[in-house]
Every structure is written in C-alpha cells, then in structure tokens.
Amino acid sequence: MKLYIDSSVFLHLVLEGEWADAAEKLLEAVERGEVVGYVSALVVEEVAFKLVLAKASELGVTSFWEVRRRLARDPAFRSECFKPVLEFDRYLDRLAGLAWVHVTREDYRRALEIASRHGLLTADAIHAALAMRLGAPIATFDEDFKRVPGLAVAGLT
C-alpha cells in the first residue's frame, strides 16, 4: 500500500493532537515498511515550522514576528526552538517505508488549478497534485482535501 502523507498526520503525532493514536498507527506501519509513505520537502517544512512555533510558544513567545526576530538574534532561543525539529528529523530517518517525492513544474501548475477551482490553500493543493501524480491516496486529517474530485483521501478517523 502507498500513501502520500500530509503534514497533519505528523503534527497530530508530535503535538499530541486529537488523532494522535490514528497517526501513530499509520506511521508505525510506515516505520515497519508495511506502507510506503510519500512526503515532500513541503510536508516536512510545514511540520518543522509548526514545531518551531509550538516551542516558541512554550517559551512565552507567541508573536510570529517576535519569533522571527528572536530566531535571528538569540542563539539560545534558536537552539531551543530547533530541538524538536532536529528530533523530528531523526524520527524521519527511522521510517523504513518513507519515500521522498519532488515537486515539478507540472505539479505546481496542477496545484494552481486545484486551488483556484476547489478552494484549497496552495500548499494543500500541491500535496493534492503530488498524491494524484503518484496515484496514491492522501493520508490526512484535513477535510478540505475531500473537495478535490479524483483525489482519494485515506480514512484515518
């Protein structure tokens, strides 16, 4: 079985979201190599971004602009904020069934069409376009993907 894994799956696991158990079950299958889980750099970037913001919030910094300023100027803050990102990166290395896919120009064009026709954010539309190119259902907790005709959405809940 192959699935394109949306960032929401990783985020529910690492941030202990509502569907953390379902995310863990899927990702354990990827870890064992029973499922081929496709990701793109965009998926990983979305997770890393949220992890940095979550850690910054734990440290009392909730303004996006203040987070940016502190990351640039405060090495101790930056080090703390990137600890969960580096831990996530090590976790990805343990997923035997994880495969990386690149975004092509055609994927981007298809994503723009998906976004403009079906009301998805462009990043989500890129994920949809990649899943469609791969012929893989998208594993996600985001209901918005169900608006895209021809995109198979894996039921995780």
Image: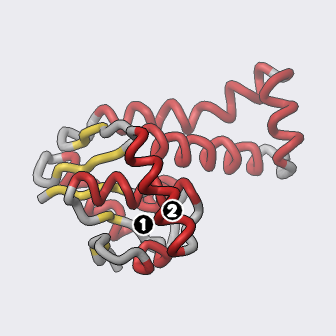
Q: Is 118 rendered above or below residue 94?
A: below
- Kindly check if marks 1 and 2 are in contact, taking CB atoms under 8 A apart as contact: yes
Q: Residues within 10 Å of mark 2 (few under 14, many from 20)?
A: few
Residue 20 numbered mark, or none: 1
Q: Is residue 56 found left or right of 97 in the rendered image?
A: right
What is the three-letter code of the residue carrying label 1? Ala
Residue 29 numbered mark, or none: none
Q: Quadrant of residue 105?
A: top left
Q: Residue at x 68, y 31 (%)?
A: 80
- The answer to whether residue 138 shows anywhere in this view is yes
- The answer to whether residue 10 shows anywhere in this view is no
Q: Position of residue 7 (x, y in %)?
A: 46, 55
* Residue at the disc numbered 2: 16
Count of numbered marks? 2
Specify how the rendered protein is coloured.
secondary structure
What is the three-letter code of the residue carrying label 2? Glu
Q: Is 15 rendered above or below residue 89?
A: below
Q: Residue at x 25, y 42 (%)?
A: 98
106 or 100, nearer to the observer: 106
Q: Position of residue 65 (x, y in %)?
A: 87, 42
Q: Classify mark 2: helix, strand or loop.
A: loop
Q: Residue at x 31, y 39 (%)?
A: 101
Q: Residue at x 68, y 25 (%)?
A: 79
Q: Is 114 rendered above or below residue 89?
A: below
Q: Position of residue 157 (x, y in %)?
A: 35, 80
Q: Is 145 rendered above or below residue 59?
A: below
Quarter of the figure that contains the N terminus = bottom left
Q: Position of residue 9 (x, y in %)?
A: 41, 60
85 or 107, nearer to the observer: 107
